[in-house]
Amino acid sequence: MVKSDAEIMSSCGEQNLSPSLFWQVREQYQQEVKRQTNIAQQSAHELRATLTCMASELGLLEVNTQLLEYAQKEMCQMEAEWEVLTRQNAQLRLRIKMLQTDLEEERQKTQEERAKAEADIERLREATLDTLLFNDMPSERS
């Protein structure tokens, strides 16, 4: 609260103070008012700077929150894709095992057929040899 000269003079008069003392008190009072005004202005300036920093930090927090939400959504999507790929991988592994089983069965059949064909070829050779030998023998009819 700023006091007027009249209030200061009245205060000095009540205390029986001289006019020169009045001007000293008035000067001290004005200096104190200026000092407190400067302190208040400095505090207001510091408060504004603090509020500006806090607003900036709040903005960064909001951006980080949005980035975190985006990353969480991406992670959920990637987890879902991972599950799909895991299922597909399991299906492909099962299909590979089935194909390996089919291939092994086909190899077994092929080996059996080859053995049978080789046996047939051997019988045909023997039969051909027997026929050739029989045809080369002099016939008893002559």
Image: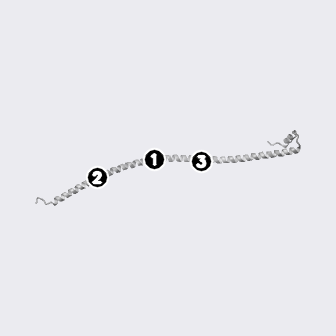
Q: Where is residue 32 in the image (x, y as percent from the top left)?
A: 80, 45
Q: Position of residue 88 (x, y in %)?
A: 44, 48
Residue type pointed to by label 3: Asn
Q: Which mark is residue 113?
A: 2
Q: Are marks 1 and 2 in contact (CB under 8 Å)?
A: no
Q: Residue 8 carries which label?
A: none
Quarter-of-image position of residue 21: top right
- The residue sitting at the left extreme is 142
Task: Identify the residue shown where x is 26% and y is 55%.
Answer: 118
Which is more N-terminal, label 2 or label 1?
Answer: 1
Q: Position of residue 51 (x, y in %)?
A: 68, 46
Which is more N-terminal, label 3 or label 2?
Answer: 3
Q: In this view, does 43 lie to the left or right of 91?
A: right
> Separation of disc 1 and disc 2 at Cα?
40 Å
Task: Identify the residue shown where x is 42% and y is 47%.
Answer: 91
Q: Mark 3 sits on what residue?
A: 64
Q: What element carries label 3?
A: helix
Q: Mark 1 sits on what residue?
A: 86
Q: Is mark 2 on a helix, strand or loop?
A: helix
Residue type pointed to by label 2: Glu
Q: Is mark 1 on a helix, strand or loop?
A: helix
